[in-house]
Image (cartoon, rainbow, N blue to C red):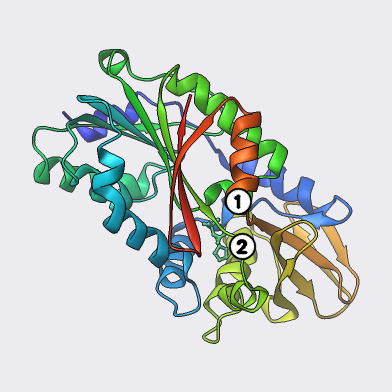
Amino acid sequence: MNIRSAFQTGQPIGTQDTFAADVIGGLTAQPKTLPPKYFYDLAGSALFERITELPEYYPTRCEIGILRDQAPAMAAMFPPGCALIEFGSGSSRKARILLGAGATVAAYIAVDISGDFLQQDLAQLERDLPHLKVHPLVADFTKPFAIPQKLATLPRVGFFPGSTIGNFEPAEAAAFLRHAGQVLGRGALFLVGVDLVKDQTVLHRAYNDCAGVTAQFNLNLLARINRELGADFDLAAFEHRAFFDAEQSRIEMHLVSTKPQQVHVNGATIAFRRDETIHTENSYKYTVDSFQTLACSAGWSPVEVFSDGLFAVHALRR
Ligand code: AVJ
């Protein structure tokens, strides 16, 4: 099938207007915040790729290791001829590991807000696995979406890797799991990658790497606002800060204003005190039990956990 035409059937989402409104809304709130989903422009996605290769940033390496080791056991749970539906598939790298593990997957549906990265990757996947129906779907996967009609009768397996679920507040994560359950339907299997609570030094280092790539990734959000909204953030006057809050079981990322200053964004003037921060991301960490409890509260039953002690891939059944 034609990848390009499949994209055009999706809903256009994430306009420049909503970006501006979200930025102004966040910067005029008290305390100031910016949504982490805006990290991933072209530059931000490239920086995130570099993060995944850092010695300190273990989650991606761990998850890929777990998938490589356990893919046959995971694939054994797939119903024959199923559709694998990936939520927020930036690249199909992890899905490929599952697709190569011997299960008879009839279709791979890659759901993403942005089609830019997906397109190239999926064209290659179609060439590599000619019997697989590859269907990109441009949609906001945090909201309900419809499975394409011609694939709607296939049994469904959901896949949400990367601990992206950690970006949500626990109540939002539960709401996401519940609506994913509605999309996937009764009896569906759901594989969810979730970062584990662990030694605080290990957590701290993962978000405070020596090479400063995470700092660049965080600051790129301001660079993006400058580029796309004509703002005048002085990147030299903001610093990266990341720390683990054990009480809330989350890494918080902030950008700290190193002096009193004013910034102009889309006609608005935003004042910063010295040491005032913009809260840019939460990355929640769960124990196996705390995640299973959350999943149960959202209508899922835990069936298996694949873990290396640092990261967990949960298998859930609806
Ligand atoms: C892509 C949300 C899983 O929380 O670890 C990496 C993003 N932020 N370094 C994470 C991120 C800083 C990442 N997630």
Relative placement, left or right, of 45 versus 262 is left
Residue 193 in the image, given as x and y percentages of width and height: 47, 49
Residue 184 in the image, given as x and y percentages of width and height: 43, 23
Disc 1 within 8 angstroms of ligand 1 (CB): yes
Image vertical order of residue 173 relative to residue 143, above or below: below
Query: What amino acid type is highlighted by mark number 2?
Result: Leu
Would you call the spot at circle 2 few (<14 residues within 10 Å), some (14-19), or many (20 or more)?
A: many
* Residue identified by numbered label 1: 166
Would you call the spot at circle 1 few (<14 residues within 10 Å), some (14-19), or many (20 or more)?
A: many
Q: Residue at x 76, y 64 (%)?
A: 246
Residue 244 in the image, given as x and y percentages of width and height: 72, 68
Q: Which mark is residue 221?
A: 2
Q: Residue at x 86, y 75 (%)?
A: 275
Please tell me whether mark 2 sits on a helix, a strand or a loop.
Answer: helix
Query: What amino acid type is highlighted by mark number 1?
Result: Gly
Instruction: Kindly indicate the quadrant of the structure image that contains residue 19.
Output: top right
Which residue is situated farthest in the bottom direction here? 210
